[in-house]
Amino acid sequence: MTRFRRTATAAAALAFTAAATAVLGFAGPASAHVTVNPKEAAQGGYARVAFRVPNESDTASTNKIEVTLPENAPVGSVSTMPVPGWTVATEKRKVDPPIEVHGSQLTEAISKITWTATGDAAVKPGQFQEFPVSMGPLPKVDSMVFKVLQTYSDGEISRWIDPPAQGGEEPEHPAPVLTLAAAAAAPAGSAPASAAAISSSDDDDDDDGNGLAVGLGVAGLVAGLAGLVLGGLAFSRTRREPVARS
């Protein structure tokens, strides 16, 4: 009986450990490079994305961000959301062939967006800042690679310009990548999506990820508690059964 008791206790402890891992094990190390969030959108649609810029320096602040849009994937409509304490400027370039947006042929497209901090708005050590952008219609390509220059108050510049490496390995200075999925065919008789429709924001993306982690964590806790209960029941049953005498 003592041996069975130890086995049941060990099984229950193992189940509880697995449950705790399910709850806490989803929190991985935060990425230190510039990213675009969400990381996926639909071809042909409009998306609201945010360039997330963490400050990697221990002594200097980030006071300028330059985002270059890919030349092979021009976008007809690009608009920025005001960021308190930051000014924004855009540059355009000629595109050929023209981009069609709502029946109009555009011969120019935004090629670069520059945010500059004013006053005390720079991103300080240990902080990050997001720079939201709405863009569309998104081109029919597999992905958009944005080259980003991050300038610090001490003059240092981090160049997040490396394209994704073949084989899945992350380059040393990865550029933010927005993956574009082919738009699903609309059901017959359904109305076309409005151009004003914006894909899920970065906050929604994070909330979905957090919700999945919490859900799996709860499931793990339930499994752990079930193991404890079963172990206790098994132990109680062995105490009630008579011991065979030789």
Image (cartoon, rainbow, N blue to C red):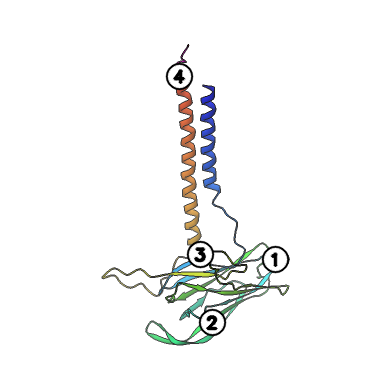
Residues tagged 1 and 3 counted as in contact (Cβ below 8 A): no
* Picture layout, residue 231 above or below residue 147: above
Provide the secondary structure element on which disc 2 rests.
strand
**Number of the label disc, if any, that sits on residue 90:** none
* Residue 244 is a magenta residue: yes
Q: Residues within 10 Å of mark 3 (few under 14, many from 20)?
A: many
Q: Quick one: SS at disc 3?
A: helix
Label 4 SS: helix
Q: Main secondary structure of the magenta part?
A: loop
Which residue position is annotated with label 1?
Answer: 57
Total marks in image: 4
Between the C-alphas of marks 1 and 3, the distance is 24 Å
Left or right, 95 with reference to 186: right
Image coords of residue 226 (percent x, y): 46, 36
Image spot of residue 179 (x, y percent): 47, 69
- Please name the residue that numbered disc 2 is placed on: 111
The residues tagged by marks 1 and 4 sit, at their Cα atoms, a distance apart of 66 Å
Q: Which of marks 2 and 3 is nearer the N terminus?
A: 2
Is 194 above or below relative to 227? below
Q: Position of residue 189 (x, y in %)?
A: 26, 70
**In this rendering, which labeled residue sits more in front, label 2 or label 3?**
2
Between marks 2 and 3, how big is the CA–CA gap? 23 Å
For the residues bearing labels 2 and 4, Cβ distance under 8 angstroms: no
Observer-nearest of 97 and 170: 170
Q: Name the residue under label 4.
A: 240
Instruction: Tell which tag, 1 or 4, sits nearer the viewer.
Output: 4
Q: Please tell me how crowded label 2 is: few (under 14), some (14-19), or many (20+) other residues with Cα within 10 Å.
A: some
Q: What residue type is labelled 1?
A: Ser
Number of the label disc, if any, that sits on residue 202: 3
Give the mark nearer the N terminus: 2 vs 1: 1
